[in-house]
Amino acid sequence: MEQMFYTLHDFMVYSKGWTYTIMGLGLVFYLLFWLFLTGRDEAPRKY
């Protein structure tokens, strides 16, 4: 880590930014995974 934090406030702002980024990516991944699971429904066979 090249960035030096001189105050707790600087560190908290930096950490909070990364937390929102990670949670946003997690939400997108969850949505894509949900679409993958629900998109595989096959039509029932009619004999």
Image (cartoon, helix red, strand yellow):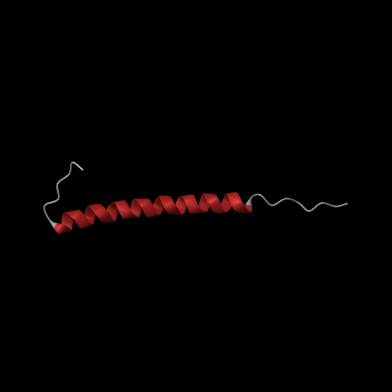
Q: Residue at x 17, y 44 (%)?
A: 3
Left/right placement of residue 15 relative to residue 41 reads: left
Count the marks. Answer: 0
Q: Residue at x 15, y 58 (%)?
A: 8
Which residue is outermost to the right? 47
Left/right placement of residue 27 relative to residue 35 reads: left
Which residue is outermost to the top? 2
Relative image position of residue 33 (x, y in whole percent) = 54, 51
Query: Foreground: 20 or 3?
Result: 3
Q: Quadrant of residue 2?
A: top left
Which residue is outermost to the left? 6
Q: Residue at x 11, y 52 (%)?
A: 6
Image quarter hosting the N terminus: top left
Relative image position of residue 18 (x, y in whole percent) = 30, 51
Relative image position of residue 7 (x, y in whole percent) = 12, 56
Left/right placement of residue 17 relative to residue 32 reads: left
Q: Residue at x 27, y 56 (%)?
A: 16
Left/right placement of residue 22 relative to residue 46 reads: left
Relative image position of residue 38 (x, y in whole percent) = 62, 54
